Image (cartoon, rainbow, N blue to C red):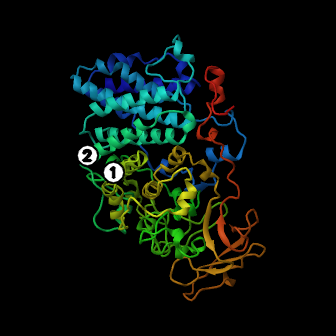
Amino acid sequence: MKKILAFTALLLGTLFYQGCSDNFLNVNPQTEIGRENFFNSADDLDMYLNSLINWIGFSAIYIEQSDDATTSGNAEFMTIMRNDVTSRQITGGWNWGRLRNINYFLENFDNADLSESALNHYEGVARFHRARFYMEMVQRFGDVPWYDKVLGTDDEDLFKARDPRQYVIDRIFEDYAFAAEHVRHSVPTGAVSNMAVRTYMARHALHEGTFRKYHDYLGLPYERFLQIARDQSKYVMDNGGFALHNTGNPQADYAALFKSTDLQGNPEVILLNRSIDGERNSGWGNTGFGHFEQSHTKAMVQTYLMADGSYLSSQPNWQELSFVEEFQNRDPRLRQSFTYPGWVLENPSTVAQGTAGQPYIQQMSQNFTGYHTLKWFINNPSASYRNNIDVPVLRYAEILLIYAEARAELGEITQGDLDMSINLLRDRAGMPFLTVTPPVDPVMQQRYPNVNSPVLLEIRRERRVELFNERHRFNDVMRYRAGHLFEELPKGLYFSGLGTHDLTGDGIPNVKLIPYTESIPQSEDRERNELGQTLIYYRAGPYGSDSQVWLEHGDHGVILARDDMGTFQDPKHYYRPIPDRHVQINPNLTQIFGWQ
């Protein structure tokens, strides 16, 4: 009990000083009780390091800012592109309390009377957390000051300037290398394992390597990091004992990973965020489905291949396919990621309207595309079941994608590489295999004009599809230097005109679009279909009109969720400013890339 109280005092002291100061680095830590009474045993070290765990959960999954989705909420990135904002308005992200906690551990952990290998493990876990922390800071700010110690009030580094990106990245990968060498392979569920370290190391090496390659104005060498991504992902492939979850059912195996109450022992899961109803609830919420704030785009839906492996853009009138048509003969992952015509709702506790046990009818409204996301939606009416849903933080699928992309970016990709990576994913989905010489999809070429490799374009497609709605797309677009994609208008379902339409796929109309200048009739005066069901009415018109559904051409076309996404400024918008209040405290923290 004494040690638990000491640890609580340590954390409370840290949190108190973080909360009371805009700049925690100016505060001398008042946690000496922790130094004397806490860092004495393996249990102490485990308890401290467990407090640093911040794996992704449902609350984070529901937030998407990329060309995959639009939002009606106050999204930072949309604000940046649509407004002339400065460091006075963009105030988030410059938070260093987590780093202080990590460095505090690193200054005290070796007080424990443990073997050298045990101490190396604990140091490796802490340095892994520091590497993750700093990589996220670099992804947001570019150059950032590097701190590997807890600072006191008289420390000369309190007012240091940014360190160059190259210097910080080198320190990050020194931390990763130490962790990869020393962190244990066998750890409790949810703890940091050697394979989790190597997966994050590969992920961040791929990010840095491709960021440097395409952001050539930085003038930084990139090959080393692509090689790290290649080698670390291959190490996991060869030594991790992982495999894709594949029971031979391409219509369900992919989706099963995102609605399971027990992923322990699943061969695909490298790192698991476990949920137990009543003890550690999943945090599942109903706002990720329907039209609360987030709404996914037609551009995402159109990324999926046809079932025969051909491109959607090769289909006649592919831009004018109805909702029912665009879900026909597609990659099975599409129907496992989005509600599709004929899908039956069983869990009515959502922000969208629907009747349990009946085919779901897409609900539409202003600022939303009409596409509703099935991935992560738990279609079960039991709250206890939903509270038990596990989250696969790291999947073996990502390792396969990292390996293939790193090999392709290095110009090394072979058919054998594809067969041991991308084609395992396609096999699970029941899709034709990718070859090293695929035909060029003009849509993909238009999205990424700085890529001249058709196989790399297809690897990017596979990554976008496989990792959809898992918080990868934003960073992917940023590292590809494809910010122009954020300027594209978010579009939704296509309607050939006003009148009746079938959205459930049975050929029987269930919605009716009327001119926005007309009023929706009383329920008793509305049309009924041949099943005796009352049609759902929507007033449709051009963007900005007093209508419920905005159509691109007023009386027909795709739904428009917005008519202006703003302008992406290259390279400025690949970074964020340091919030002005911190620059006022430390004038050495100058802004970069045109931020004021």
Q: Is residue 54 above or below residue 98?
A: below
Which quadrant, please, contains the C terminus?
top right
> Percent x, y for residue 150?
45, 19
Q: In the rendered structure, are the residues bearing label 1 and label 2 in contact, judged by CB atoms less than 8 Å apart?
A: yes
Q: Is residue 286 above or below residue 29?
A: below
Q: Residues within 10 Å of mark 1 (few under 14, many from 20)?
A: many
Identify the residue at horizontal 56%, vertical 76% (top origin).
Answer: 316
**Farthest top residue in view:** 154
Q: Residues within 10 Å of mark 2 (few under 14, many from 20)?
A: some
Identify the residue at horizontal 62%, vertical 45% (top origin).
Answer: 77
Residue 116, label in figure:
none
User: Type of residue at label 1?
Assistant: Tyr
Question: Which residue is the site of mark 1?
Answer: 396
SS at mark 2 in the image: loop
Q: Is residue 93 above or below residue 337?
A: above
Q: Is residue 354 visible?
A: no
Identify the residue at horizontal 63%, vertical 42% (top origin).
Answer: 570
User: Type of residue at label 2?
Assistant: Gly
Lower sequence index among marks 1 and 2: 2
Identify the residue at horizontal 57%, vertical 74% (top origin).
Answer: 321
Judge from the rendering whether residue 119 lies leftward or rightward of residue 48; answer left or right: left
Q: Real-space Cα distance between discs 1 and 2?
A: 9 Å
SS at mark 1 in the image: helix
> Percent x, y for residue 491?
62, 63
> Percent x, y for residue 8?
40, 27
Judge from the rendering whether residue 92 lies leftward or rightward of residue 411; answer left or right: right
> Percent x, y for residue 271?
33, 45
Question: Which residue is the site of mark 2?
Answer: 240
Query: 517 or 428, which is in the foreground?
Result: 428
Which quadrant, please, contains the N terminus?
top left
**Farthest bottom residue in view:** 530
